[in-house]
Amino acid sequence: LLNWSSNKEFSFLNSEKYWKLIGESISWFKENQHQHFDFLFLIGLCYEKGNGFEKNLRKAIKYYVMAVIRGSEIAFDRLKYFIDTENE
């Protein structure tokens, strides 16, 4: 399971500039969501964190599932995190 707060690969996810770009790209992501699991994962992450969308964990999980179906390993890790924390 990935540690989002300390993993250098994902430290950019905490930057204000990154989230601003994500917010500006939301409509493009939504239009192309059926094709790209990366975009599905990012939309899920936006819903999970409340960036660009109102925070909504159900919608986050929905987008993570769609990304996993299309082959996203990172979305699978996020889903596993939700499952693991719910069973604690």
Image (cartoon, rainbow, N blue to C red):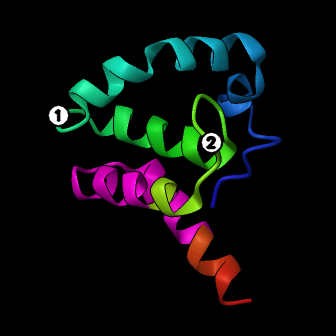
The image quadrant where one finds the N terminus is bottom right
Q: Secondary structure at mark 1?
A: loop
Viewer-side label of 2, 1? 2
Q: Residue 57 location, x and y as percent?
A: 58, 60
Cα gap from disc 2 to disc 1, whole angstroms? 24 Å
Q: Which mark is residue 54?
A: 2
Picture coordinates of residue 3, whole percent (x, y): 74, 51
**Camera-nearest residue between 42 and 1:** 42
Q: Position of residue 67 (x, y in %)?
A: 32, 49
The residue indicated by pointer 1 is 35
Judged from the image, the secondary structure of the residue bearing numbered disc 2 is: loop
Quadrant position of residue 46: top right
Q: Label 1 is placed on what type of residue? A: Gln
Classify 10 Å Cα crowding around label 1: few (below 14), some (14-19), many (20 and above). Answer: few
Q: Quadrant of residue 7?
A: top right
Chief secondary structure of the magenta portion:
helix
Query: Residue flagged by tag 2: what amino acid is it?
Result: Glu
In the displayed structure, would residue 50 be above or below residue 65? above
Residue that appears at 47% across and 35% down: 42
Q: Is residue 33 magenta?
A: no
Q: How many marks?
A: 2
Task: Give yes or no for contact between labels 2 and 1 (Cβ–Cβ under 8 Å).
Answer: no
Identify the magenta region. Answer: 62-81
Q: Residue at x 36, y 34 (%)?
A: 38
